[in-house]
Amino acid sequence: MTGFDRLHPAIQHHIVNSLGWPGLRPLQEATIEPVLNGEHAILLAPTAGGKTEAASFPIFSRMLTENWQGLSVLYICPIKALLNNLEERLSYYGHLLGRRVGVWHGDISTSVKNKILADPPDLLLTTPESIEVMLVSNRMDHRHLFEGLRAVIIDEAHAFAGDDRGWHLLAVLERLSYLTGRELQRLGLSATVGNPETLCDWLAGSCPSPRSVINPPAPNTVVPEIQVDWVGSVRNAAVVISRLHRGEKRLVFVDSRSRVEELAVELRNLSVTTYVSHSCLSLDERRMAEEAFAQGSDCVIVATSTLELGIDVGNLDRVIQIDAPFTVSSFLQRIGRTGRRAGSSRNCLFLATKQDAFLRAIALLRLWEAGYVEPIEPPPLPLHIYCQQVMALVLQEKGIAEADLSKWIGRMPGFTQFSVSDRSSLVSYMLERSILHSDSGIIGIGDSGERIFGQKNFLELFSVFTSPPMVKVFNGKQELGEVHQLTFATKEDGPACLTLGGKSWVTKYIDWARKKAFVEPTDIKGRSQWLSMGQPLQFEMCQSIQRVLASDDIDPWLSNRAAALLESLKQEFDWVENGKTLITYTKDNATWWTFGGRLFNSTASHLFSSESDQVKSDNLAVEFIGVIDRDNLIQRIRSFLAESFEQLPAILDERFVEELKFSECLSQEFADKELSCRFDVKKVFEAIRNMDLGIIQIG
């Protein structure tokens, strides 16, 4: 008996007759039996690999066979745009089976939400933050709403697991399980990751039922079309895009919102039909752009990673990457947007505008060719998320006894990393600070908690990330999006001009009290700000860059310009050797080339800051400017590498470490403990200390 044979007859009928499918894909067939058996699972496949159907068809089958009633399935996504994108497809499947699908997130109107509460759908598309709102809201009976819940599907599970939002998600699922009195089946959908078993265990959490990774081999003999070109600037990149692949639909990835806007303006100046998509555009602006692009043919859409996560923008002809993503997994997501049509192949053109990004592109592709994909590593010791969950439970239950906290969230793996004694100490500190208060043993929100988190009905509690100060931008009544408030810094030569949605605007009026700016179109080129810490490179990527510089290999996917630049860089860095850490020096300066990543190098720059007038660090090296005593510096580095550390936490640098949200709930001891655990660079240190240390004079 095949998996298809085990599906409910109604689903079998509609797969064949309504959808007209000749059969199921390998992933879809392989998923049926474990899901029908109630297992927790991670489903792995590239973008457009049929993961949504692989999870939803057997879940719908269980719904019909076991006669689930009311809201029985949550389908959770990391971004609202993906929820909107999936609603039509899942609603169609539900309609065929006589079941209803709804969507709930921050942009859904109150009237629609009230209809959902009055008559819940069978499947609800939502986010972890929206579930949190439903659980703590005074306006709804969450016990009644969730009493029939049986299963959750988590789309893009890897996007959750790698940061604190994943711990928030798991904590919410733990609370839902306790609320319903049953173990909820958990299904995660993910692109390729380096450690799928770890991801599966993370997702299943404290659940005792069997779990499995479903990743059947997908035959694909077509070699992807890859090319790396050197263009030197965003303007030159726009010229290349305007001339290449005319008549085709091109998705261009850029890894900052400011550069998305810059490239869009350049393309429109070259008469290229261009659309824009990034997270700071308004919902209407994004929808209009994505729908227009999906229906177009000879056009370009310029986007950040928001279009990396499976949002359907129609059949693409080309993916173009300005510079390079920071991980192999991002590259796999992006190239996976192409090659969906029969007879087409996956492709990606890299247009490098900066030399460091050029090297990163080559290093990334060599890791990819070697079969490497980054492992997903949930951040350790989420002490601040525990504090958030305590406050959320206080609001949800209208007060709670401390002893009952463990019943709700005590089994979640992230929280079992610290002791019961530590959990009690966290609560005690929050009581001392009046973030919480206790009345006859029942914990409530204290005066300080109300003051710090209580604005707008505790809105700040629903998200685990700190939001920068943003200003919404309007043209008349139409909301365009939002930018950082520094965009409107006072200018002596007139009102601020900005770029948003690939168009230029001049500021007419700013309502600072309501954080709103009103603008009009202009021909003057503007610039918008969105502050970002940037992304430190992982050790494996830095080591791959070192191998690129030290290798004589010639990559077949390099253009002539790119090959010439690489040869020039190899000559400039002809002293680089594989498997070595190197110190280069001139008369007054020295550079320690660790190829160890920015976290490790930042720590080293602080440890040896007294050895020179100025110390700088980046992903590849630590630079000492105005060395006081070169021989002493070298000896100190040798001594440092000879030491043994139980733990070597990074000395944190504000460039890439954001302040923990809910840090007001942590004593200094616990805050230091969490950050030290999260930014431990001992693994990198151990790898570097096992390398030979070379000393090279330059010039």
Image (cartoon, rainbow, N blue to C red):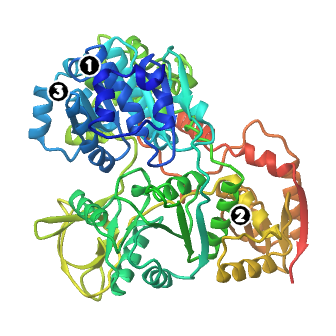
**Label 3, on which residue?**
120
Residue at x 76% of width, y 60% of height = 608
Residue 348 visible in the displayed image: yes
Q: Nearer the viewer, mark 3 or mark 2?
A: 3
Q: What residue did someone put label 2 on?
A: 620
Question: In the picture provided, is 649 more to the left or to the right than 67?
Answer: right
- Mark 3 / mark 2, whichever is N-terminal: 3
> What is the three-letter code of the residue carrying label 3?
Pro
Which of the two discs, 1 and 2, sits closer to the camera?
2
Quarter of the figure with residue 503: bottom left
- The reply to whether discs 3 and 2 touch (Cβ–Cβ < 8 Å) is no
Residue 407 on image: x %, y %: 41, 13
**Above/below status of 291 relative to 139:** below
Q: How many marks?
A: 3
Residue visible at 40% across and 72% down? 248
Q: Position of residue 319 (x, y in %)?
A: 48, 65
Q: Secondary structure at mark 3?
A: loop
Instruction: State the image quarter where residue 261 is shown.
Output: bottom left
Say which mark, if any, is on residue 656.
none
- At 26% from the left edge and 17% from the top edge, which residue is drawn? 68
In space, the residues marked 3 and 2 are separated at their CA atoms by 54 Å
Q: Nearer the viewer, residue 335 or 548?
A: 335
Q: Which residue is mark 1?
A: 397
Give the amino acid at mark 2: Leu
For mark 3, does the 10 Å Cα neighbourhood hold few (<14), some (14 to 19), or many (20 or more) residues? many
Amino acid type shown at disc 1: Glu
**Circle 1: is it few (<14), some (14-19), or many (20+) Cα within 10 Å?**
few
